[in-house]
Image (spheres, helix red, strand yellow):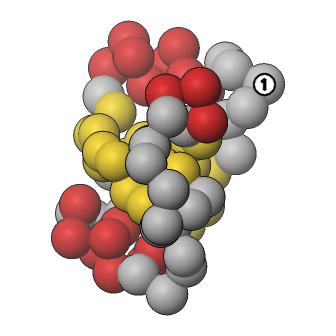
Amino acid sequence: MIYKVYYQDSLTEMPVRENTKVLFIEAESELEVRRHLKDRQLNIEFVQLLEGPYLEYEKNSPNFKLETV
C-alpha cells in the first residue's frame, strides 16, 4: 500500500499550511509508516492511504518519489 504523509520540518513550530511537505511511502500499514519515520525530526500532520484514481493522479505528479519501508 502507498501512503501520503503530510508533515512539517520543525517539531517546535506551529504547523503552517504553506510549509506543509509530503512524502510517499510504500508500507504494509500506517503504523509501519510511523515507525519508519520516528527517528526523523518531522512533525507528522496526517498519514493518508492512497488508492484508485487518487493514487494514479499522484503517480503522475512530478513530486512523486516513493520510499519503501
**Residue 1 % position (x, y):** 33, 50
Of residues 23 and 55, the one drawn nearer to the viewer in this rendering = 23
Question: Would you place residue 11 above or below residue 5 in this image?
Answer: below
Question: Would you place residue 29 above or below residue 46 in this image?
Answer: below
Along the horizontal axis of the image, is 1 left or right of 6?
A: left
Q: Residue at x 34, y 33 (%)?
A: 50
**Residue 65 % position (x, y):** 70, 45
Q: Say whether residue 51 is visible.
A: yes
Q: Amino acid at mark 1?
A: Pro
Q: Residue at x 49, y 87 (%)?
A: 39
Residue at the bottom extreme, as displayed: 39
Q: Residue at x 34, y 48 (%)?
A: 45
Query: Which residue was labeled with disc 1?
Result: 62
Q: Residues within 10 Å of mark 1 (few under 14, many from 20)?
A: few
Of residues 44 and 1, the one drawn nearer to the viewer in this rendering = 44
Residue at the front extreme, as displayed: 13
Q: Say whether residue 5 is visible.
A: no
> How many labels, in total?
1
Question: Would you place residue 45 above or below residue 39 in this image?
Answer: above
Q: What is the quadrant of residue 53 in the picture?
A: top left
Along the horizontal axis of the image, is 33 left or right of 7?
A: left
**Residue 61 % position (x, y):** 69, 20
Along the horizontal axis of the image, is 43 left or right of 19?
A: left
Q: Secondary structure at mark 1?
A: loop
Q: Residue at x 41, y 81 (%)?
A: 38
